[in-house]
Amino acid sequence: MELKVKYVSDKIGTEIPAPAYATDGAAGMDLRNASGGDIVIHAGERLNVPTGIAIELPSAEYGAFVFARSGLASKKGIALSNGVGVIDSDYRGEILCAMVNLSDEDYTIEAGERIAQLVILPVVRPVLKVCKELGETERADGGFGSTGRV
């Protein structure tokens, strides 16, 4: 699969590394702060951080998904305010990361810092079939916690 990438910022590929996979086994490529400088995200604050890139997915059979960086989220409390960002195949604008500081301390996102991961996944768009009954299962409608703690 080919993913077309447009550099919206002239700093990408020069001052700021282009999106890349950190290891051979990485599922997501790193996205970076391409705002042109450091950004302070205050405790409890939400803000959009530009990545300096736009993409073109080949078809509606693919979606791009922006996930938090686990180290940044678990160690510093910096995550994505929308949980996971969804980039539809027909979107051509710059990818922005909706960041949130869940900690009680301000955090400085440095220029060029890795802030999120971009994962490309297949998308299935089912035909909906309205029905009055669903198939039986052992779990049935048991929801949160219904399968126990262990």
Image: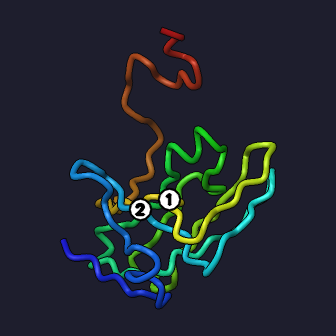
Report if residue 12 is visible in the image.
yes
Q: Mark 1 falls on what kind of element?
A: strand
Q: Tell which residue pokes out farthest to the front in this image.
A: 15
Residue plotted at (46% across, 22% down): 140
Q: Nearer the viewer, residue 83 or 136?
A: 83
Report if residue 127 is visible in the image.
no
Residue plotted at (35% across, 62% down): 125
Q: Nearer the viewer, residue 127 or 146?
A: 146
Image vertical order of residue 1 relative to residue 82, above or below: below
Q: Mark 2 falls on what kind of element?
A: strand
Please indicate whether residue 91 sits to the left or right of residue 144 in the image: left
Estimate how packed mark 1 is, as few (under 14), some (14 to 19) or many (20 or more) residues with alpha carbons within 10 Å.
many
Q: Position of residue 66 (x, y in %)?
A: 47, 60
Asked which colour scheme the image uses, the reply is rainbow
Q: Dot 1 corresponds to which residue?
A: 116
Which amino acid, by three-letter code, is at mark 1?
Ala
Q: How far apart are marks 2 and 1 (CA)?
A: 6 Å
Residue plotted at (70% across, 55% down): 100
Image vertical order of residue 10 relative to residue 41, above or below: below
Q: Residue 32 carries which label?
A: none
Estimate how packed mark 2 is, as few (under 14), some (14 to 19) or many (20 or more) residues with alpha carbons within 10 Å.
many
Q: Where is residue 29 in the image (x, y as percent from the top left)?
A: 36, 61
- The count of marks equals 2
Q: Earlier in the sequence, mark 2 or mark 1?
A: 2
Q: Dot 2 corresponds to which residue?
A: 30
Which amino acid, by three-letter code, is at mark 2?
Asp
Residue plotted at (52% across, 70% down): 112
Q: Position of residue 72 (x, y in %)?
A: 56, 47
Are the residues at dot 2 and dot 1 in contact (C-beta closer than 8 Å)?
yes
Image vertical order of residue 20 relative to residue 104, above or below: below
> Could you say which quadrant of the image residue 88 lies in?
bottom left
